[in-house]
Image (cartoon, helix red, strand yellow):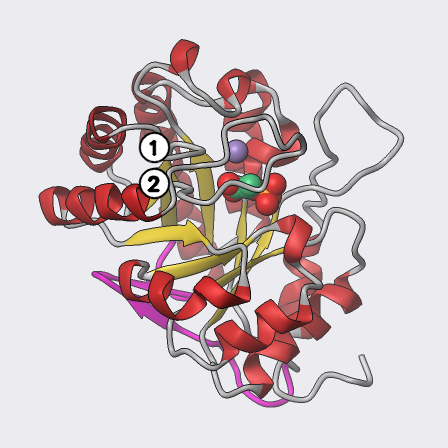
């Protein structure tokens, strides 16, 4: 890909990003938690559950990019304070979305990883702003974007001086509507050919269907992904956002019990 300079595989073998106890790009990392921070109780209960199941990082949105302006928009600063409390109680680092370039510097004080959502993948002023911080950035693939467009967005962040970019495939729009999006699993080996940046899979937003999340999570491991981003809610029936696709803690725990041995097996195949 001709425009890639810093993101190109030619420059570095593999980027490894240290967050808490995990080395993203080397270890298999599981980021899990609710779609949005709804309350202290909901976030803490879910955080303790995902920690107990073996997750490495807690996810949760305080700023939500909703299709409708009338849907729950997130708790903002209050949500970040709740995430901070969850981090202190569980020891899990936090990944959370930032929507607006004006919020980047102060959200970066709460977040261990800044998430750029699919709808903002090509928000170039936002990309430049997160590029000026040293916080790792989880850059989700735009739902209408090619791999080349996505990697050029990573290049925007890298070229501002922030080398800590993690790519996240979260499904793209196709004619298929049984699933919420179409998971492009081939992005994993393709991205591995093109760049040294780690890539994780979001099986939740890409499928939008509970029954498909576990098999696609396992398939992500087999494809060589560096990790997963999964929505879990302590009581999905009450979730204010994406209730239909949140795993219960029990279901998540079962999945974790399947993921780790598969990853260990894949690791032995690769060494
Ligand atoms: C999310 O992960 O909270 C989210 C909004 O995902 P996406 O940007 O992929 O829709
Ligand atoms: Mn969601």
At which x and y percent is residue 106? 34, 66
At which x and y percent is residue 233? 36, 23
Seen as rendered, the residue at the extreme right is: 175
Q: Which quadrant holds the N terminus?
A: bottom right
Q: Is mark 1 within 8 Å of ligand 1?
A: no
Provide the residue span drawn in magenta. Answer: 9-28
Between disc 2 and disc 1, the foreground one is 1
| Mark 2 neighbour density, 10 Å: few (under 14) some (14–19) many (20 or more) | some
**Of 37 and 193, which appears nearest the observer?**
37
Judged from the image, the secondary structure of the residue bearing numbered disc 2 is: helix
Q: Which quadrant holds the C terminus?
A: bottom left
Residue 260 numbered mark, or none: 2
Residue under the image location 49 percent in, 88 percent down:
161
**Of 42 and 26, which appears nearest the observer?**
42
Judged from the image, the secondary structure of the residue bearing numbered disc 1 is: helix
Alpha-carbon distance for marks 2 and 1?
Answer: 6 Å
At which x and y percent is residue 93? 25, 54
**Residues at discs 2 and 1 in contact (Cβ within 8 Å):** yes
**Of 174 and 117, which appears nearest the observer?**
117
Residue under the image location 80 percent in, 59 percent down:
146
Instruction: Check if residue 248 falls in the magenta segment.
Output: no
Residue 256 numbered mark, or none: 1
Seen as rendered, the residue at the extreme left is: 89
| Mark 1 neighbour density, 10 Å: few (under 14) some (14–19) many (20 or more) | many
Q: Is residue 270 above or below residue 153?
A: above
């Amino acid at each position: 890909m001709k425009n890639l300079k810093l993101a190109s595989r030619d420059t570095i073998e593999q980027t490894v990003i240290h967050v808490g106890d995990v080395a993203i790009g080397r270890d298999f990392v599981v980021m899990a938690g609710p779609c949005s921070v709804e309350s202290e109780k909901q976030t803490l209960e879910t955080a303790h559950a995902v920690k107990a199941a073996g997750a490495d990082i807690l996810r949760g949105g305080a700023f939500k990019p909703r299709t409708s302006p009338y849907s729950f928009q997130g708790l903002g600063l209050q949500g970040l304070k709740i995430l901070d409390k969850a981090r202190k109680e569980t020891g899990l680092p936090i990944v959370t979305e930032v929507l607006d370039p004006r919020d980047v510097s102060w959200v970066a004080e709460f977040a261990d990883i800044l998430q750029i959502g699919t709808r903002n993948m090509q928000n170039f002023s936002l990309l430049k702003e997160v590029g000026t911080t040293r916080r790792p950035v989880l850059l989700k693939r735009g739902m209408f974007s090619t791999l080349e467009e996505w990697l050029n967005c990573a290049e925007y962040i890298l070229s501002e001086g922030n080398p800590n970019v993690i790519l996240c495939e979260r499904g793209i729009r196709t004619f298929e509507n049984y699933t919420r999006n179409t998971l492009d699993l081939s992005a994993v080996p393709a991205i591995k050919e093109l760049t040294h940046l780690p890539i994780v899979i979001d099986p939740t937003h890409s499928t939008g269907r509970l029954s498909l999340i576990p098999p696609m999570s396992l398939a992500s491991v087999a494809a060589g992904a560096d990790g997963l981003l999964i929505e879990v809610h302590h009581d999905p029936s009450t979730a204010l956002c994406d209730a239909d696709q949140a795993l219960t803690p029990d279901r998540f725990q079962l999945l974790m019990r399947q993921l780790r041995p598969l990853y260990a097996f894949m690791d032995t195949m690769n060494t």
